[in-house]
Amino acid sequence: MNCSHPMDAAVLADYWSGALDKPEEEAVEEHLLSCDSCSARLGEVIALAEGVRTLAREGSLRMVVSEEYLKRIAAEGLRIREYAPPPGGSVQCTVTQEDDILIGRLTANLSGAQRVDLCICDGSGNEQLRLPDIPIPSAAGSIAYQESMTFAKAMPTSTMIARLVTFDESGSERLLGEYTFNHTRSMPGKGAW
Amino acid sequence: MLIYSVLMYEDLDDADLARRIGCGTDREAEAALFRRMAPRIRLYGLRHLRDEQAAQDLAQQVMITTLEALREGRLREPEKLASFVLGTCRMTVLNQRRDAQRKQRLLEQFGADMLTPVWTAMPRLDHEHLARCVQNLRERERAVVVMTFYAEQTGEEVAGFLGVSAANVRVIRHRAIHQLRDCMGVAQ
């Protein structure tokens, strides 16, 4: 049976995550209980949400994460390895088979910054990846960057440099902090990119 | 003959099935309504109970209550079946610890063999493809999606992290959901 008022998948995602107010939620539920096609679409949204949860648990996403995210990870019994090199400094680091999540804690004065980019560079300082316009936690003096655990576990002994940059009014880039991670491979094998 | 009968019932809308059940003991209509409604109720159960087995149990209990009401003619306006089922869902979730013996007795009364729904499995996603799609989102979109679906943070909590309003978080989440579905090749 076709639906005369198909529900937007994004609204169904709001419903699944409990983001609708009560009247909206009731209207969605009453519709879902009379509509197979929208119920099927909700099934797709649930599969998507579950897929995202799995990716988060695997620690395979490169992203800036919140403290609540890290609390949730810890509450699930997952093992977090965290390094916090000082701005302009370096840290010796590694990952083991038992680690689930890898966090680089980057301290910087972020106050007043409208846009901050996180640049991931090789040991020579050549930019390999840029995460533009990262979330800047309000009233925080640092960001928690999650490196892909899949990537880190495959990584050979090498150096990675992270840079936080912002932009002045003329659009010129300004360095907020540079952090060097000297990674020593402790996983079996030589590792490869 | 049975296949013909099933097809005929599948063509009827929910209200027509409810009317047939209310007119007497039309077992085929009851079975057709059960097949149709139980998977929908299961989704309600998953949303509120976050447990597959509990959601399936909820679907069975709600359908038994619904069929009982239809048989006894307690639903005067069959067009409002969804509203009745929603109310029953809410009551049942509030009163989950039901008497197991009563459930068994009702199952026997209504015929457990007839009232066995075929649960539709959730769509399977290509995990590697999804990882690429999530990674390709903008930073704030990825943060909103992960904080919503994994950390189960509210719009206000996510807004606090991003330094934007809760309404803005909703806009970002909507855009991200559409992009993910587009990237995964799912029709909007």
Image (tube, coloured by chain):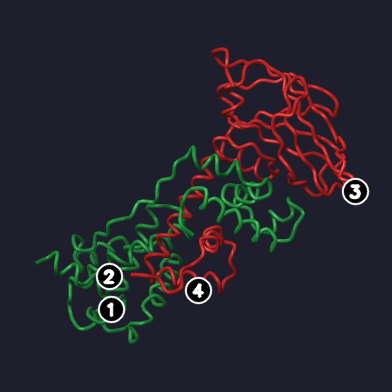
Mark-to-mark CA distance, 1 and 2? 8 Å
Q: Nearer the viewer, residue B40 or A165?
A: A165
Q: Farthest residue toward the right?
A: A169
Name above or below for residue B186 compared with residue A108. below
**Residue named by callout 2:** B33
Residue B99 falls left or right of residue A97: left
Q: Amino acid at mark 3?
A: Glu
**Residue named by callout 1:** B18
Q: In the rendering, which numbered label is found on residue A27?
A: 4
Q: Residue sitting at 62 percent across and 38 percent down?
A: A74
Q: Amino acid at mark 1?
A: Ala
Residue B7 falls left or right of residue B138: left
Marks 4/1 same chain = no
Mark-to-mark CA distance, 3 and 4? 47 Å
Split into 4 quadrants, where in the image is the C terminus of chain A? top right
Chain letter for the green part = B
Residue A72 falls left or right of residue B92: right
Say few, some or many: other residues with alpha carbon within 10 Å of mark 3 (under 14 / 14 to 19 / 20 or more): few
Q: Amino acid at mark 4?
A: Ala
Q: Position of residue B88 (x, y in %)?
A: 40, 72
Mark-to-mark CA distance, 4 and 2? 21 Å
Q: Residue sitting at 44 percent across and 72 percent down?
A: A31
CB under 8 Å between discs 4 and 1: no
The subunit letter for the residue under badge 4 reads: A
Residue B32 falls left or right of residue A48: left
CB under 8 Å between discs 1 and 2: yes
Name above or below for residue B109 compared with residue A188. below
**Residue named by callout 3:** A169
Marks 3/4 same chain = yes
